[in-house]
Image: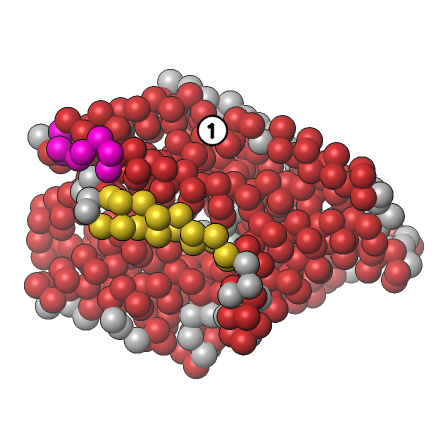
Amino acid sequence: METLYAALPIVILIVLMGFLKVSGDKSSIVTLLLTLCLAIFAFDQPVSDALNSFIYGMLKALVPILFIILMAIYSYNVLLHTGKIEVLKRQFSAISTDKSVQVLLITWGFGGLLEGMAGFGTAVAIPAAILISLGFKPMFSAVVSLIANSVATAFGAVGVPVIVLSQETGLDVIPLSTAVVLQLSVLMLLIPCVITFLADPRWKALPKNLGLSLSVGAVSLATQYAAAHYVGAETPAIVGSLASIVVIILLGKFIDRKKTAAERLPYSTSEIVKAWMVYALIMLLVLVTSPLFPGIKTALQSVCASSVHLAIGGVEKTYTIQWLTQGGVLLFIGSFIGGLIQGGKAKDLLVILWRSLVQLRKTIVTVICLVGFSSIMETAGMINHLAVALSSATGAFYPLFAPAIGAIGTFLTGSDTSANILFGKLQAGVAGHIGVDPTWLSAANTAGATGGKIISPQSIAIATSACNQQGQEGNILKSAVVYAVAYVVITGVIVYIFA
């Protein structure tokens, strides 16, 4: 019965969103209330602990998740206001008018770069908004951005998920990073194929799509493996995405080689530089404050920080926000200064910020409830109970299901990092009991978590906000779940075969 109770919130959330098509905010409120009742009455969690768990989750939802979502949407709205989005649209079209090239460049290349540098939803929100500006349908833009934001999340936010996994398990970062790349190797080839097929499903386009996808996937795999094996967790997503962008641009030029120079780019160099200023400043700020420059990061973190202390289960939990290195702050600074450079007025840019906040009102409710209920499930022992039940039921076949545990963690928390905190030690512990390399099985947690990211309700909430599709969360979930399940199954087979 405990296993049934632990699984009930997940089942209810999927039924409400996926089958009954209840909006994300209403579904998440119902799930939160159900989880509170189960934690208190079925798992004997004190009311004070349950409430503090929710508050702890709410803080994590507000900063960084919702803060970053807001500023990602704001950055796009600034471009709309200044009119520079038109320049970006023409530049993407100048690279290639081919839909497959455009979608792959924006979601896999540019989105992967955003994930590698910033993470926390930027790689879904910004590419989805750009796709819509190029004329793609909102539902398509949301789904394809979610699918593309999978592999890169293993090394998102400058490698934080794998670095945290290393800290939790006591295993070396470089072997863990290398194992993650190897486990995701097949998917690095398959996901670009899926993206290009969704962008252009015509049979006559299949040879072109396969050539483009496999070339990009192979380059991603080779560069990510080299970065993981020789450097560590910080750079695979960044290096792989940059290499992918170069290959996509070169192949895009070849595919559209008959275009005239006049058709390609009607803007001056200064206009193009101004158009990219918002995203260029964001990437520069994220890079400078990343672990790649530890001295700068440490100095900024010590200047301005806020901490909240909560007692949960007899243990004091502290939630700290280092504001000057916070992704949302960096996005705001880049967007605001970039908007001024593009000709916007400070007053107008602040009005746009308020409008962006109003635009996200339903998303704010959804994400707070989702992160809140996952926090309660964690502290009440419900998530760990599900993982232990699955490991006990599978026995020698556990490696086949190890990625599914990571996927459950990301589905619930919306974060690959959180999934590794929840289940990293469990995976390493089970490895010792069944005679499997702990590094390989721990890496499987991250690999599976990247698949769960596709259908995480938090990621879906980000996508619906970026595409102005609030209320369509259930339809997006139904469209994306097939790809997520296939993703996790393929990862499980790879983990099991080579365990």
Residue situated in front as seen by the camera: 315 or 154 = 315
The answer to whether residue 44 is magenta is: yes
Secondary structure character of the magenta stretch overall: loop
Q: How is the image coloured?
A: secondary structure
Is residue 102 in view from this perspective? no
Place of residue 29 in the rendered image (x, y in percent of width and height, measured from the top left): 38, 24
Q: Residue at x 62, y 55 (%)?
A: 330
- Looking at the rendered image, the quarter that the C terminus falls into is bottom left
The answer to whether residue 255 is magenta is: no
Q: Residue at x 55, y 58 (%)?
A: 304
Judged from the image, the secondary structure of the residue bearing numbered disc 1 is helix
Mark 1 surroundings within 10 Å by alpha-carbon count, few (fewer than 14), some (14 through 19), many (20 or more): some
State which region is magenta: 42-49
- Relative vertical location of residue 446 with respect to residue 23 in this rendering, above or below: below
Place of residue 143 in the rendered image (x, y in percent of width and height, measured from the top left): 52, 38
Residue position marked by numbered label 1 in the rendering: 365
